[in-house]
Image (cartoon, rainbow, N blue to C red):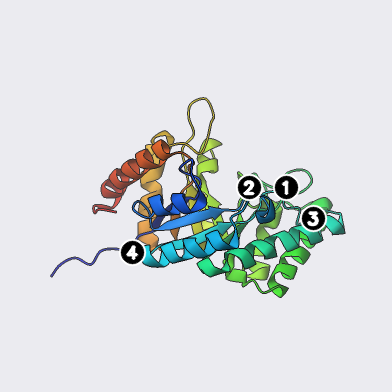
Amino acid sequence: MAAVPRVRPRIGTTSFVFPASWIENVRRLARRVEDIEILVFERPERAGPSPAEIEEIAALGRAQGLTFSVHAPLDLALASPDPAQRADSIEAVLRTARLTAPLSPHTLVVHLEPAAGGLGGPSLSRPPQHDDWRRRAASSLEALLAGGLSPGAICLENPDGGFGAAEPLLDELGLSAALDLGHLARDGVPFDAMLARHLSRARLIHLHGTEPGGRDHRSLRHYPRAEALRLLRALAGAGWAGVLTLEVFRQDDLEDSLQVLAGWWREAVGEDA
């Protein structure tokens, strides 16, 4: 009897790999990956994509069997002490969600700005300013849920070392997680604790290398090989079927990363990715 292939992650990358349009990136990436993270880093009314582009991207996805994730704008202030800033950020996320709805994205990645005194790092202590920050962040996230987003579709991304003061919100609101393990490796932080706490809720894992000079979001050739093998064995052992996003922004880095990842998967798991 033939062996049953084990469950494996879907391999994805970003929508900013080629110096070309949104649509051309999706068209060219469809032959290389299974998921594309549409990076709406700027407000869509300023930098796109347009509704017509989204419709065409959705059609390409259906034809090519692609899935999509979406990254909300980076200039959010969902936990700001200023109510006007929070309201503006809530509306920016909802506009992004409405714009990209034709893609049927499985996640909407959202950043929360760091709390006073820092949000990341290994400590999960919550001094009073973190409690205030967390209440404001929770209020904004609840407004996103009231605006029609599902808890599982909202994916909080860890800022560098960990979720810190935001961690309780994942359970309290039933949110998903996007785990940027590339940044952990950059900072020399082991991924074990984050995987143990959050893999079951993770829909995305961001992986990328850091060059010797400190520049991250580069080829996986710059990611620690031993750590990569441990990670892939852990994901295979858990039967994790989320999206492993190669968070790179250049064609050479993507092509190199795909080759490196395929070799690591064979070495770690004993079968082709």
Q: Which residue is mark 2?
A: 159
The quadrant holding residue 184 is: top right
**Mark 1 in CB contact with mark 2 (< 8 angstroms):** yes
Badge 4: residue crowd in 10 Å (few <14, some 14–19, many ≥20): some
- Residue 7, visible in the rendered structure: yes
Q: CA distance from mark 2 to mark 3?
A: 15 Å
First of labels 3, 4 by sequence position = 4
Kind of residue sitting beneath label 3: Trp
Kind of residue sitting beneath label 4: Val
Where residue 254 sits: x, y (%)? 40, 42
Direction front: furthest residue = 52
**Mark 2 in CB contact with mark 3 (< 8 angstroms):** no
Q: Which residue is mark 1?
A: 114
Please say if 101 is above or below 32. below
Badge 2: residue crowd in 10 Å (few <14, some 14–19, many ≥20): many
Q: Which mark is residue 7?
A: 4
Q: CA distance from mark 1 to mark 2?
A: 8 Å
Kind of residue sitting beneath label 1: Pro
Where residue 39 sits: x, y (%)? 56, 52
